[in-house]
Image: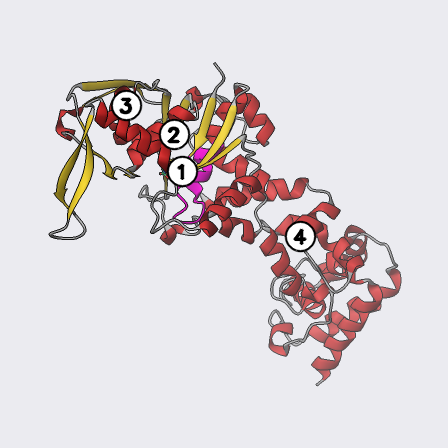
Amino acid sequence: MTVKTRIAPSPTGWLHIGTARTALFCYLYAKHHGGKFAIRSEDTDRARSLPEYEEEILAGLAWLGLEHDEFVRQSERVSRHQELLEKLVEEGKAYVSEEESKSEAGKMVQIVRLKNPGKSVTFTDLVRGEITFDTSDLGDFVIARAIDDPLYHFAVVVDDMDMEITHVIRGEDHISNTPRQILIQEALGAPRPAYAHLPLILAPDRTKLSKRHGATSIADYRSEGFLPEAFVNYIGMLGWNPGNDREEYSLAEFVEAFELDGVQKHGAIWNREKLLDVNQQWMRKLSDEDFIVQGGITAPDDTKLRMIVPLLKERAKTFKEARDMITGELACMFSAPTLDTALLTVKDVGGNTATHLQRLLNLFPDLHEGMTADEIKAVLMPYADTVSKEEGGRGAALWPLRYALSGEERSPDPFTLISILGAGESGVRIQNALDILKG
Ligand code: GLU
């Protein structure tokens, strides 16, 4: 038997984190077993389904690297659904019932109900073990709003049967749908797939993850500049445990390692900080060139941009942060800052800022092109170390030096700045700060 799984998103919204994680597990399980992974767009809710959602969901799954072997659009299968509804009615396993419409008072509609044998249904869930439901409470439940308009449960069962899905891996919120779907399967004489219901992804406060906890759609993470490799690595660990301490997995490594017995039963907590850290690790693995290209990073000066990639790798956790740094805290690498005298002298004790800057500038003839930040530090730090505690310590010299160079309260250290700006440009900026201090 070839394993075949499917992700069955409804295109009534953007691709959500939970769907992406379910899709990943479906993909991993199938590929681990040399099987196939299908996508089924469940677009039978005609009022709410939109082609642009379907497009975006497919683009999001492709971005994650979850290549599918088959694509099915549920709305294109309506005649098949109708054929099997009619068959069930003919066989007396379902019946058409004339009832008042729920949405339009007074209007009579012909809905289709399944003749429920009212037994208890037991299935083995590959995550949660044996589950038994008494289905007698469900009564003769509705399987179609009309003979040509099947409800979700019926369409899912028919499609899973026709697509030869062997493993239904989906969110835990579908557990209570399973007994209904098994009754429909039995009425149709369809084989029962194996079931695995995945724990939900919860917000840090253990409530259902929603917009108020931050972005929930994959598109938002894409535009924020997360790497798909990082995203896959992070969501792959949400509710799955390899049974050891290993945390870093590429998609191929997950395929190798993934088994459903590593899926935990309790909810998995979404942790943005952790995702950011994982993303940073993956960003740091990129060569400097790939970092610039994949991050869509542009700057006024290419040579300087190449020089600051190590700083971006050290500081940015998303590519958006990296891009923002080019126009924010690292803008000083590309153009001279406008200085604020109050900030220049904020660490001043006894009016010595100008003296410190002048003394540091006097050491500049000892600097030359190509020096590393450490070598520059070795030239300038001894002066800063001479500033006594009473006069504000080394910070009284290093703060105005750094601020004169960057014009930012937060920036790389002054030695790193000089190593990138060059001694010439740095000297000009320090002289400019001195001129401002002279008034
Ligand atoms: N279309 C359903 C949903 O988006 C999934 C159905 C299933 O996986 O069985 O929740």
Q: Which residue is mark 1?
A: 74
SS for callout 4: helix
How far from the left and from the top, in percent, is residue 86? Answer: 26, 29
Q: What residue is drawn where x is 61% and y is 52%? A: 319
Q: Quadrant of ligand 1?
A: top left
In the image, the segment drawn in magenta is 8-24
Dot in front, 4 or 3: 3
- What's under tag 1, amino acid-wise? Gln
Circle 2: residue type: Asp
- Secondary-structure class at tag 3: helix
Q: Nearer the viewer, residue 40 or 108?
A: 108
- Going by the numbered disc 3, the residue's amino acid type is Ile
| The magenta stretch spans residue 13 | yes
Give me the C-alpha separation between circle 1 and circle 2.
8 Å
Is 106 magenta? The answer is no
SS under mark 1: helix
